[in-house]
Each structure stands twice: as C-alpha cells, then as structure tokens.
Image (cartoon, coloured by chain):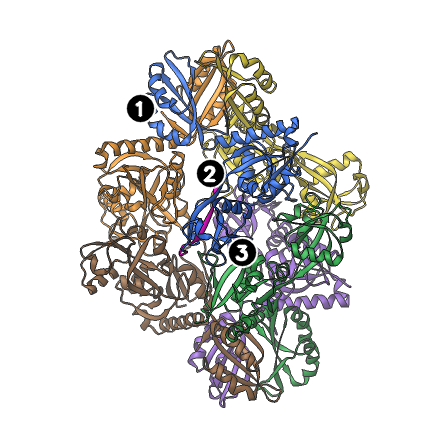
Chain colours: A orange, B yellow, C blue, D green, E purple, F brown
Amino acid sequence: MPKLKLGLPKGSLQVPTMELFRKAGIRIYVGERSYFPSCDDPELEIMLVRAQEMARYVEDGTFDAGLTGYDWIKDNKAKVREVCELVYSKAGYRPVKWILAVSNNSRVKSVEDLKGKKIATELVNVVKDYLKKKRVKAEVEFSWGATEGKAGTLADAIVELTETGSSLEANYLRGIDTVIESTTRFIANKRSYQNPWKRNKIENISILLQGALAAEGMVGLKMNVREKDIPKLMKIVTALKKPTVSPLTIPGWVALEVILKEEMAKRILPELKRAGAEGIIEYPLNKVIY
Amino acid sequence: MPKLKLGLPKGSLQVPTMELFRKAGIRIYVGERSYFPSCDDPELEIMLVRAQEMARYVEDGTFDAGLTGYDWIKDNKAKVREVCELVYSKAGYRPVKWILAVSNNSRVKSVEDLKGKKIATELVNVVKDYLKKKRVKAEVEFSWGATEGKAGTLADAIVELTETGSSLEANYLRGIDTVIESTTRFIANKRSYQNPWKRNKIENISILLQGALAAEGMVGLKMNVREKDIPKLMKIVTALKKPTVSPLTIPGWVALEVILKEEMAKRILPELKRAGAEGIIEYPLNKVIY
Amino acid sequence: MPKLKLGLPKGSLQVPTMELFRKAGIRIYVGERSYFPSCDDPELEIMLVRAQEMARYVEDGTFDAGLTGYDWIKDNKAKVREVCELVYSKAGYRPVKWILAVSNNSRVKSVEDLKGKKIATELVNVVKDYLKKKRVKAEVEFSWGATEGKAGTLADAIVELTETGSSLEANYLRGIDTVIESTTRFIANKRSYQNPWKRNKIENISILLQGALAAEGMVGLKMNVREKDIPKLMKIVTALKKPTVSPLTIPGWVALEVILKEEMAKRILPELKRAGAEGIIEYPLNKVIY
Amino acid sequence: MPKLKLGLPKGSLQVPTMELFRKAGIRIYVGERSYFPSCDDPELEIMLVRAQEMARYVEDGTFDAGLTGYDWIKDNKAKVREVCELVYSKAGYRPVKWILAVSNNSRVKSVEDLKGKKIATELVNVVKDYLKKKRVKAEVEFSWGATEGKAGTLADAIVELTETGSSLEANYLRGIDTVIESTTRFIANKRSYQNPWKRNKIENISILLQGALAAEGMVGLKMNVREKDIPKLMKIVTALKKPTVSPLTIPGWVALEVILKEEMAKRILPELKRAGAEGIIEYPLNKVIY
Amino acid sequence: MPKLKLGLPKGSLQVPTMELFRKAGIRIYVGERSYFPSCDDPELEIMLVRAQEMARYVEDGTFDAGLTGYDWIKDNKAKVREVCELVYSKAGYRPVKWILAVSNNSRVKSVEDLKGKKIATELVNVVKDYLKKKRVKAEVEFSWGATEGKAGTLADAIVELTETGSSLEANYLRGIDTVIESTTRFIANKRSYQNPWKRNKIENISILLQGALAAEGMVGLKMNVREKDIPKLMKIVTALKKPTVSPLTIPGWVALEVILKEEMAKRILPELKRAGAEGIIEYPLNKVIY
Amino acid sequence: MPKLKLGLPKGSLQVPTMELFRKAGIRIYVGERSYFPSCDDPELEIMLVRAQEMARYVEDGTFDAGLTGYDWIKDNKAKVREVCELVYSKAGYRPVKWILAVSNNSRVKSVEDLKGKKIATELVNVVKDYLKKKRVKAEVEFSWGATEGKAGTLADAIVELTETGSSLEANYLRGIDTVIESTTRFIANKRSYQNPWKRNKIENISILLQGALAAEGMVGLKMNVREKDIPKLMKIVTALKKPTVSPLTIPGWVALEVILKEEMAKRILPELKRAGAEGIIEYPLNKVIY
C-alpha cells in the first residue's frame, strides 16, 4: 500500500491541528510513542516535529507534506509547494503576529532608533530580512525563549509572537512594529507533488481540511416562506449567498435553505422574521465544500 | 459607529449568560481586565456588574440595556422597560424562588407567626413589600450573605434564594412560604428604548436570545413516508406541530420534516417507525424562531 | 400509573450507559441516594446494581428489564429474554474480550497445557464451561480482583477482561485464547415481556437506544446537483446507501441527501466535488432509525 | 541475598499503607507493572493483592508476611501469626466497623427479627458465624458491591463496612448492631516466623511501623525551668509521661523535655507558662519508640 | 459543661484561620452544616459569620469571643475587648490595606480633588470618618463588590482592600492614599471577659494562637562548641536571643541551643560556622511560647 | 545598599531551585512579572533565564552569580568560578546524564560506527568535543527539541538528557554511551568573586544551600540510655556518626543524640531498642552544617 509521509507540528499548534483533522474526519491518536501518532487512515504515516523545523524536512523530502506556519517557512527560506492556507492557531481562527517590542520606559520609538542596538528573537532570519528592508543595521541575537523578559535588560528590543498583545502588556512591553503576520500552511514537497497518487491524496486531505475549517462558524438556515414574499426575502438572503428553494406540498409556500456564517445569520434572522419567514431554524454543520 | 451600552451580570449568572449569548451567535471574551469583556459585535459595549445593581444602572442610563433577575428589578424598585423574559439560571431552564424559611425546630408555622420577629435577607425591599401585603409587622435585617446559617441563631427567619430546595435541607431549614419567583429579564432604559437605532438593536438581540433559548431541548425530525401513510402519520405528528411536507422524485413518496421538543421526539419515534416512516433521522438545532 | 422497573449497571459501564440514555432522550439523575437515580420519564423506576448481579435480578423478576454484559448473563446462567444487543462499552463502540493469559515467560502455549493447573478469574462459571468444552481439567479459583498480577505468581493462568490488550502488555502477559466475547445486552424478565404495556415500553426504549447508538459516527450529507450529473453521482453514493432526491425550483437541478458513516463521508466528499456536486454540507445527527 | 516476601493490600488501604511505610523509612514505588512495586529495601519482595485474599496467601506461604484487616483474616478463617496491630485505615487512625443495617422504614429492630430473612454482604463467613452465635437462622447472600442500595429492596438487611456511619445515613439506613470491629494487622506465615532471619526482619519492620504510627499526633515539648519550680511543673507534666531533665550551665536552671500527645500539649501549655516555664517550644516528631 | 461561644470568619480569612487553629492544636471540622463547624475541644461552640458582621455579634453578646479584622471592628464602631492582635491574612503574615484609588487616566491626584465627587466602597463608615478627618465633602456609595471595575466608570474613586497592590495594577487603577491598615484581632465581649471561666478559656486560646503564630518562620538551632569559643559565639547569638547552654560529656565542649527567626538563622549560620561551631543543625518548630 | 545580581534557571529546574532556596531560608516569589521574582533578602536582585544561557550571562557580568547545570557551562565554554556543586535536579537528588542513543533497530553499536553520520542534539559543543576526543568525525546538528523522535528518522543518532533512562525506552531508543554527567552548579563571575562584599554574600548563600541540601533525607535521633549500655550502643551508633552525649539529672542515665541518614536510622532503630535505649524519638531537620 502506498503511504503519504505527513509531518504535523508538535507544540502549541498540536492540539488545534489534531482537532481540525478530527473535524475533517481523520482521527489521530497520539499514543505512548508520542512522536509517531497512529491514525485511522492507513495511507498516512504521521510524524510530529517542531513547527520551526517542518519546512526544512518537507523541502528535503523527509516528508511528502506537512503543516506549519508561514513565519517558519520564511525563516527557513524553504522551497516548498504551498497547497492551501489554513487560518487557525492555538488561540482561534485568526493570524498571529510577530511584534517588535521594547520596554515601556525605553526611549526607542521606531525601528530606526534601534541602529547599532541588540534585538533578541527566536525568528532570526525573518528579523534580519526585515531590518535589511528597513535599512537599519542592528545586531540580531538568537533567544532560547523567555524572550519577553529580555527587553530593556538583556537586549534593547525583542521580536516575539503574540496572538492578542496581552502578553506584551503583562510584561510591561510596548510594541512598535509588526515584523510579520503568519497563518498555518499546508505545504508539499515539490517532487512528491508531481507523483499522481501523492498529489491526489494531498488534494483530498486539503479538501477535507478546508471543508472542516469552512464549516467553523457556519450554520444552515431553513424556513418556510410564502411565494409572494420570495422577492423581499431574496433581497435579504441573496446578498450573502445563493439559497436553495424547494417546493412544499402546501400551495403558495416554498422551503428556503441557505448556508452562511453564523455571524451573518445572527444579523439577518430578525430581518427574515420581520419579512414574513416562518418556522425559521438554524442548525449546525460539520463540513462545507463549495 | 453607534454603540449600545449593555450590562451583563457578574457572579452566578455570568457563565450561563455568556453561554446563552454564544448560542445566540454573540461571542463575548472575558479577558484580563475582567469587568470590560470584549465582543465580536462592534456595536456592543459590555460591562459586568452584579445582578443586584443592574436595574439601578439601566434605570439611570449608565447602560442602555441589561440582563438581571426579576427579583433584583423589584428590590431596586427600578423603572425600566422589560424587553423579554428569559427562563434560565445557573442551574438550568427553570425559575428560581426566594423562600421564607425557619430552622427545622422552630415553632414558626406561617408568616403570621413572625409578628415582631427578625427576618434576615439580602432582598430587603421585596421582603418588606411581601410583609406589608401579608399585614405582618416584622423587622427585616439586611444580610451580607451566609444567610442560611442565620435562621434560629441570628434571626428568627430568613428569606433566601433556592433553585432546588436542597440547600435548605442541607442547613436544616424548613421553608414556610415562597416570597417571590424570579426569572432572568432583558431590560432597557426607557429613554434608550425610544431611540430608533437602539430599540432596533435591542430587539434584534432579544430575537436572537429567545431563538437560542427556544432551541434548547428541541430537535428536528426528518423521514421518508409513503403518500398513503400520510393521514396516519399526520395524526401522530400534527398533534404536536405543523410539519413541512416536500415532494421526493420517487413516485408515491414524500419527505416529512418537523421541529419539536426532544422530549416529544422520544415519545413518537417508536410510533412513527411502526406507522411506516423510513430513514428517520433526528438532528440538533441551534436556534428556533417561530 | 404503571411503572417499569429497570436495572442499570453500577461501575465501569455506568457513565457510558447514562450517556447513551441521554442521547436516546432519557435523562437520568444520579443524586444523593445514589442507588436510586431519578429520571425524566415518570414510567421508569431505576435502580443501580453491579453488572455481575443484574441477570440474577432480572431473571427472578426483581427488575422487569436491565442492561448488562453478555459475559455476566452467561456466568449467571440466567434465563432471560434478550431484547437487543448494544455494542458499546466504557472504552468505545466495540466488544470486549475475556482473554486466557499467562506470564510472558510461561511455557504454557495453549489451553491444553493447563491440565491440572490453577486459573484465577472473576468469571468462574464461564471459564469452567470453556474448559469443559475444551476437555481440559484444571482448577478455577475465584479472584476478588487485581487478577492481572497473579499470572505466574499466584496462579498458572488468568482469565481477565480487556478492551484493547494494552493492560495485558503492561503486565507482561501473553494472551493464548479468547474465552468469550461480550457486548452489552438489553434484557427482560420473561413474564414481564408477556405483559403488553411492559413489552411496549421495553420496545420503545430499545428503539431509542438503538437509534442513538446507530447515529454514533454517522452524518448527513446534502448537496445540489445537476440532473445530468445524477447517474455519475449515484454511482459514488448508492454504493453506500439509498439517497433521497428532491426537486429544486431552479430548472435542471435537484437536491440530493444521504445518511452515512462519517468514515465513508470523508472518502467520497472529494469525489463528489470532482463529479460536479455543489454546496456540499455535512451535518451531525442525534438518532438514526431505519 | 535472602528476601522477605511481603503482601500489601491493593484498594482503599493501599495509599495509607504506602504512606505509613514511607514514615517508617521504607519507600515503595508503585510503577508501571503495578502489582509488583519496587522498594528501597533490597531485602523485600513486595506484591499487591486484595485485602480480601491476603490472609489466604500468607497462610499457604505464598507470602512470608502481609498487611490486611482483622475482618478478612476472620472471613478467610486463616491460621496465621499476628505480629502487631496497626490502628489506621483509609479514613484515619481508628477502627472500622461492619454494621448490620436495615432500611430506615423497616420494622426490623434487632438481629432476632431477621429470622428466615435474607442478608446481603461481602463478608459472608463472618456474618454466618455472627448469626450462629446469635442463634438466628437467616440466609446470607454474597454481594458483589453496591450493597448499601440493597437493604429493603433486594435484601432484608445488609452488613456493610463503615468508618463514620455517614454512608449509612446518606442511604437512609439504620444500623442495628455491630457485627465486627476491625483494625489493620501485620501477619506472618507460621513457618516463616520460625526462620530466624525472617523473624528478625519481620520484627524490624514491625518496630518501624509501630514507631511511625506512635509518632502520629505526638509532639516534643522543651522548656527551661527554675529548679525550685520543678515540683510544681512535675505535677503538671508527669501526670502524663516521665520527662527528661538535663542540667543547664546557668545555676539554678534545668531543661525539661517531654514527649506527649499534641492534644495533651495544647491543654498544659498555658498551665506550664503560668507555672514559670520559659522559652517553651513544641516540635514535630517522625517516630517514637518506647 | 460550660461552653465558650466563638465566632470565626467565613470567607477569605476562613482557610488561614482554620490553619492557625490547627497549628495551635485545635482541630475544626467544617462539615455538611457548614456554618456550625465541629471541633475537638468540647468546650467550644463555633459559628462562622462574615468578618464584616463579627464585631457586631461579639458586642451584643451573641458570641463570647471572635476573630475579625481591625477594619471591620472600626466600620462597625463596635465596643469590644481586644484580647490580642494576630498578624496574618489570606495572603500571609502581614497587614492588609484599604487603598483610595482612581483610574490610571483620572485627573484626581489627591483626596482633596474628590470634593463633591462619588466614592464607591464596601467600607462606608471608615471612609466617611477618613473624609471627615481630611475635611473633604464627598459622596460615599456602598458597593456590593466588583468595586475595582468602577473607578472612572461608575464612580470617581474607590476604596478597596489590597494585600499587594497587584489587583489595582491589573485593573488599571492608581492608588492615591491608604485609608486604613488592618490586621486580624481576637476580640471578646466585655461582659464575658469578666466571667472567670470564660476569661481563662479565652486567654488559653490566646496563648495557643500566639504560640502557633510566633512559631511561624521560627526554627531551633543546636550546635556543639568548644568552651573557649563561647564568648565569640555568644556575641553572634546573644545579639538575638538568650541561648541555652548545656554540658556535654566530652571535656571542653558544650551544646548550645537557641530559638530564633529562620530569617535570622540564615544570616548567622555562616558566621557560626566560621566561628568554630560544629555539627550545626536547624530543626522546625510547632509552637513558641516565651 | 549593595546588591548581588543572581540568575536562577527558568524551566524544569525552576521549581526544585525555588524549593531549595526556601529550605535554605530564602523565600522567592514568582509574581506577575514572572521574569523578575521578588525575594525576602533585600541584598539579592534575581532574574530568571534559561539554564542554557545562564553561564553566558554570569561570564559577561550581567549576573554576579547563578545556578545552572555543568552540561550547559561546558556547552557555553564559559569562564566562570564554580562556587559549589549541588546534587539535585527536577527528578531528585542525583546527577543527570546526556546519553548517545540510537533507534532500537539501528545497526550502530558504538560511537565509532557513527563516522560520517548525523547526530542531533541540543548540546552541540559538548557533543563536538566528545567526538573529537573519540576521534570520530560526524556531523552534529542542533535540535530545537523533540529530539527523542529523531533517532533513525531525522538523524542517525541523538544525544539527549535523561534522568532515569525511561524516556529512552518509551521512545524505542537504545543508549550506547554516556556523553557527559551533569549536576547543578552555583557559579560566580570571576571579577564579582574578587569583590569582598560580593564574595562573602556568595559564600553565605553557598553555605545555606549546601546546609539545606545536606539535611535532605537526614533526621535526628535522641534517646535515653544507661551509662553501662553506652559501649554497646556506641558500637551501633558510632559506626555511622559521632554522637553527642549529655548528662541527665537521673543518676546512671545520659541522653544520646545523633544526626544521620533516615535510611540508616531505619536500620539501627530496632537494634538500639534491643540494646536498651529508651524513649527513642526521631525528629526532622531543616539544615545540617558540619
């Protein structure tokens, strides 16, 4: 049986990645030998590695495909095929940012003030590229972690990952620029992507992951409407999405069904009610594939 | 952008209120600065205050609207607009009661026996009104909490909140009357409710909260039925709720769909099967708006 | 009001049993007096007893019906009516096995090598019957538990329950035969089953429990398809399950709906997309009754 | 190297037993292969078995010594050497009782009223002996557990273990007699106890366990006293325990030290102060061996 | 048997109070009927009430004695006998402060700026007295809690309890004055204190509580020293506390023992070693009574 | 006031280091701003950094002193003054080892077989020195962690920290050599160590830490003995440690006291009792300084 070698990120992305695969219908069991999870899809051979190193191993063919952040792909300067973007992280469904930050009481106001100074970060290469682009010469020092404690003590500035900015505040730091924004990417080795079986397998996984992610925050709406109210209701609904209209056996009535963001649903539900829709229900979805 | 200032209850109602808003499609994040939660609806400006104080702040316009209990609205003698009733509490989907209780070994049998005695409670004004109505003159003393321990020791009787009565038993108390029954209310400031934008916003939230609450314990049933079996099946189903009938492409068959209490569903499912329904499925709902 | 006396298993099956009843729509509350749970179905009178003793009390009419394992029905040699099989256990949706096992370094290779030796087990009668069938004479000693530690020390072999085999490995044991496979059974007292009201009640519960169990791991798929694509799509879908086709109001399009294993869904979703299906959604189910 | 085979109880006594050994200075590690803990005393070979079965295996020489309850020694009618009594249990430092109990609303008042009735218990033999002594003929049925729920439903009475009586109350039971009181015992195989090395080892363990248990709730008191106050102070102290008096280099002063129950210490500390003792300290103890 | 009615604080002081009594040798069990704990001293009758209300009930004789904070004694303007001060709180062994605080971005710099403004607090009377002393007329509004969220929103300033100041920072508040510092006090009813038995009992408890509190952070040091080194060592040690010197049987050597703060011990241990002390040990203490 | 800048390790050593300082009498509070703990010794200014980076910062004078592992001192090739060795780690009181390991099914038997192969490790420099000494040319690749999963997949061998070897087993690895053994070291900056105030402060801390560590697992024994029994008892006791003998006021009796390993205590306690010692007590110790 052919196998696809798939790398998944160990660390902060691990739990949400497992959860996303579960929603996509692929159950992964992280057992005793924890770097090699088992899986209910016998065509997959999974290994866990740090997100930092993933692109490196996909580039050199150790894995056929893998999931990691755009930040670490860039930091590794890796030549890989990006199959799809997946906007999720440990903290939710939004990008993360690497912020250039200084101590609250530092005199540094912008990156230009860092000329000749020292910046501590885990993301050395990306920060060096950023400084080059900004034409600022500064020392970039690799930090093993606990970076937030260093600004104003062990370094003049830091570049650190943040999802909400609250960890900066908690450490009395002030952000002065965003160095890079990042989301998760599903990447493939370039040669593996030319093999027809592997490419098909990779694309199937991509469809399921995107379907599961698309269903996040989406809901189905179903309601009974009078045929005469259709134009009015269509104006509310079709602004968003093409609805499905199916006949009912009661003359003059049809059923209207539409898939949309829960966020949109909550906005139009009161309007639909006012426009004459009856028996409106909202139901949950597992996957949405357009 | 216009903003609606909304007060939500801090304390025992906080978690179920957040949960109800989440079901209604409004996500609220209680972060570090915990009295000012953020929210995915930019038109809302939320603050957490005690349920006891809510009506006061809605009345004076500090908040345009808020959620609190009927008990505390009455105790504050607040002049506010009640938008809708929402039957939920910390313990489930039922009203709570404030019980007049005495120690198990007290000789007091009814409220009349409390003439000239002392009653400890957090709900001073409501209890005073209750005594006036009962034409009983007794002292009402404000209690800072830990009230259940006071009956028979620091006071002759207490009036305390209970959802199940079990906390009375656990403290060797005997209930002798219900002073007030209370459910959660969505209330609005009277002037805010005359502002068209605010009123529309308040009503939209009301529809969503009610839709989410109505879906609690409700399910959808869908099944394929022979046209000839419709009368028989209708008798089972329509006793409850008007079902939706839609045509199938197989001649002689239609699809029948109905929304009902899970409790009812479990009663009629066996009957539906015996009456010839096929491929019956029951699915979950997020919101139900009639 | 007539009552059905129902015995439910206390111990490792208790939590998954309560969960299955909840999915079936019957809520059971295990309160303070923990052997007599209350229930939202007033026609049920529930008591918790050990799975080991259940069949004994259903046979003698103490209970009208009960849930227990096939293993303990056999060990009690109980004459009861089996209403339905329910494939679930503490660890998931699969049968459990009682394994005849010896220490890794034992010379015993098969049950025949146990002639004249001692076997420790909780399931004495089933093991005795097994040995009789195998024509092996060996001593069977009742074990109060902690049985896995006894193989090779206090006994020559043990017979112990296992769901995955991992507890055998962890104790350096080697399985040499499966003595009995067991699943949960819904059983009834023979006389109670002849009473029409009780039989109807028992069968209703059986339909709900089976419906809830059948919905485990199943999902609904719904999609819009062009009429001309139906044959192509039918080939993908009908291999699995007869789909429901209903008309849409847009000429040339129909809606196709099918209920199937989530595991199958994830396999065919990419194919359906390639074959022209649009707006595919997958939604969750509570119960499935064929 | 000679080894002592020691059986320790698996189940509710396991944690307090490990704790007592740790206080005695013997550290036991319950590792992966959980029935065979390792130990920092290389002369011990430990195995965990149920307290119910312990006496059986000490009697037949499988173990040289073991810890179990007096109740299960009696129920097994085992012929073993009792080395010492150790008054501790899961719930503290006091004996446990097996109580004959009936439902609160039963008419049974004493054991005599149980003539011809059914009693459910785990402790079958002890209960049979008890009935014989009381000259009451009744059926004793073995119960696999969940016994407390059976009184008044599946049996007329039960005999069940209780440390405080609160579990009886919680199940609406009324105790009518104590069948047996039990404490933990350190027992030895009779032949092993005649072997000099084994006997010496067993006695060393016994001294350490008793020393650790004796130190529970005991403290040391030390104070400086004037020689002239000695008679007065002795009256307070020696009522309890012979104190140690040692000279100080300051003329006219001595140091007084005594080991006693913390409970006593708290009573006499204020008196000692009033009687002229100075610099009184109370310090904790690990072991006390008289 | 005579009884002393003792009030203990429910709430944040409860756990450290129970812990202090335990160290003093008085074990208190907070059981099911949680306002009336049981106790291993049969002469005590204990009740839990809020610290806020304690002084009121000691003053009126409901309790003979009680523990509460100096802040709440003052707020109640209670006439009680203070038996002793006990410096401990939820957070450790130091006083707590009530801080007058405003929002970080408020223009208020000192209490004088609050003329005509509103201050929210739980400690109304103390704050009123404070304002009177400062000759500032301002409105003091009682707050039910969640006070920290009110500064700059619902009030112009707040007065709130803080043990470390960190909760102010976390809520973006700036302290501008300390209104009152408070420690725990053991107080007695004036009449009860004149009853000889009650007074003796109260003083015994006071000695034990102070002894347990004094032992907090204290240790014993014991060492062997050459007689010729005594003067040198005495200089180090006696600066702190009179040591006990006792003879050894080895000529020329004595044993030196001293009780002191662990904090001091850690400072002089290196010096003692350098000055020739040998075999120095430091051991823990339960109680210290001078 | 002069200050000593002290670096403490963040990460797996953090908790046991805080615990050791607490035993030494120095209380450290890790508060909100977690990289700068506060401390009850005002002469210390503490910062938390990774053990990996500590030696670097002590060498360059950022810190006057710090605690870290011998492994990381070597890897940093740092020129620092080693003040003392402290044998403790996250897992207990013993050294840790960095093991060269390969996959169970690798053909590599010794370090020589790794010629031309790749070794992954966090401890790059130490491994390079080790290979140089072994005259083996191999590639050493820095690993960000999750190293144990790399042997046989991403590298031919790994060098990884292990305290017990169990993590190797759990990952199906086979150790083939120990690269370095390591314990915790208290290190000082060379220049700081020449400053008299700083040197004295550093040595005081060193004495306290060693005293606290020495007391681990040690206990005090005290007993009363007859003078005539002294020779017999001395034989048992002095084999271990010189005891302290002090006179009692009862003629013919002396008190004997000795400090020794709890492990030894448990061996000789029974012997002491048999040899005539009376009133033997064992008490706990905080610090032991010889």
Dot placed on the residue nearer the N-terminal end, 1 or 2:
2
Residue neighbourhood size for the residue with mark 2, other residues' Cα within 10 Å, grouped as few (<14), some (14–19), many (≥20)? some
Give the left or right position of residue A94, taking residue B126 as reference: left
Which residues, given as a range, are shown in magenta? C94-106
* Quarter of the C terminus of chain E within the rendering: bottom right
Which mark is drawn over residue C94?
A: 2
Q: Amino acid at mark 2?
A: Arg
Q: Position of residue F82 (x, y in %)?
A: 32, 70
Q: Give the farthest residue toward the top.
A: A251
- Report which quarter residue F43 is drawn in: bottom left
Q: Amino acid at mark 1?
A: Arg
- Report which quarter residue F48 is drawn in: bottom left
Check residue C97 for magenta coloring.
yes
Regarding mark 2 in the picture, which secondary structure is present there? Answer: loop
Which mark is drawn over residue F278?
A: none
Location of mark 3 (residue): E163
Location of mark 1 (residue): C274
Check residue B103 for magenta coloring.
no
Give the left or right position of residue C130, taking residue D152 as reference: left
The answer to whether residue D98 shows anywhere in this view is: no
